[in-house]
Amino acid sequence: MWWGRRRKRAKSHNAELLRNNCRYATITTEIQMNARLHHTGIIVANIEAYLANSFWELRGEIVTDPLQQARLCMVGLPGEEAKAELIEPIGENSRMYATLQRGPGPHHLCFHVATMTDGDALIREYRLLPVTPWEPAVLFAGRAVRFVYSRSRELMELLCDEIIA
């Protein structure tokens, strides 16, 4: 009967999809080991006002990044390793200005990768959408950063150990 053949084809197709997904899971596991969560970016209207009313402690100094047109600083929890980056857009030309207009809050997740090549491999493997090229980050002493969107529309920053002059 015709529906019996159709059912058999569907079963073999589902088995093939399962095999492919298992292969994909193996590949992604290998790449995930090369990237680890570094910090969370939080967009705020004013860094000093935000710190005065929060439990975060300033880690380092507040810097101005001319590429992002923003003031930036790293903060952490007292006695903990958890880190966040506070981002204060400077003016309407800042990349984050429109985001701040929707309200302060979480902005991005940053993942550390060893090299730009590893970051590019991660972008290809997860089919991430690059938003910026690799650029020097003032907050991280010139280390290269690149912003990408995930397929779930999450903004992510890739931070590597390589320094861009």
Image: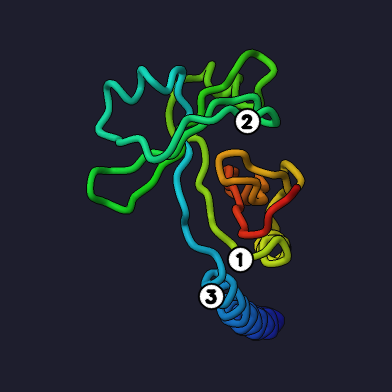
Spot occupied by residue 139 in the image (x, y as percentages of width and height) = 56, 40
Which amino acid type is marked by label 1? Answer: Ala
Instruction: Report the amino acid beneath label 2.
Output: Asp
Q: CA distance from mark 2 to mark 1?
A: 23 Å
In screen coordinates, is 106 left or right of 165?
Answer: left
Q: Earlier in the sequence, mark 2 or mark 1?
A: 2
Can you say whether 35 is above or below 29 in the image?
above
The residue to which callout 2 is attached is: 65
Image quarter in which the N terminus is found = bottom right
Q: Please say whether residue 154 is visible from this viewpoint.
A: no
- Give me the residue at 30% from left, 36% from top: 57
Name the element at disc 2. strand
Q: Is 85 placed above or below 15 here? A: above
In front of the other: 99 or 61: 61
Q: For the residues marked 1 and 3, what is the alpha-carbon distance in whole angstroms?
A: 16 Å
Q: Residues within 10 Å of mark 2 (few under 14, many from 20)?
A: some
Earlier along the polypeptide chain: callout 1 or callout 3? 3
Is residue 129 among the parts visible in the rendering?
A: yes
Q: How far across and down, in percent of the image, does residue 21 sit?
A: 60, 76
Q: Name the residue carrying label 3.
A: 29
Q: Are marks 3 and 2 in contact (CB under 8 Å)?
A: no
First along the sequence among labels 3 and 2:
3
Q: What amino acid does circle 3 point to?
A: Thr
Please give left or right for residue 93 compared with residue 159 in the image.
right
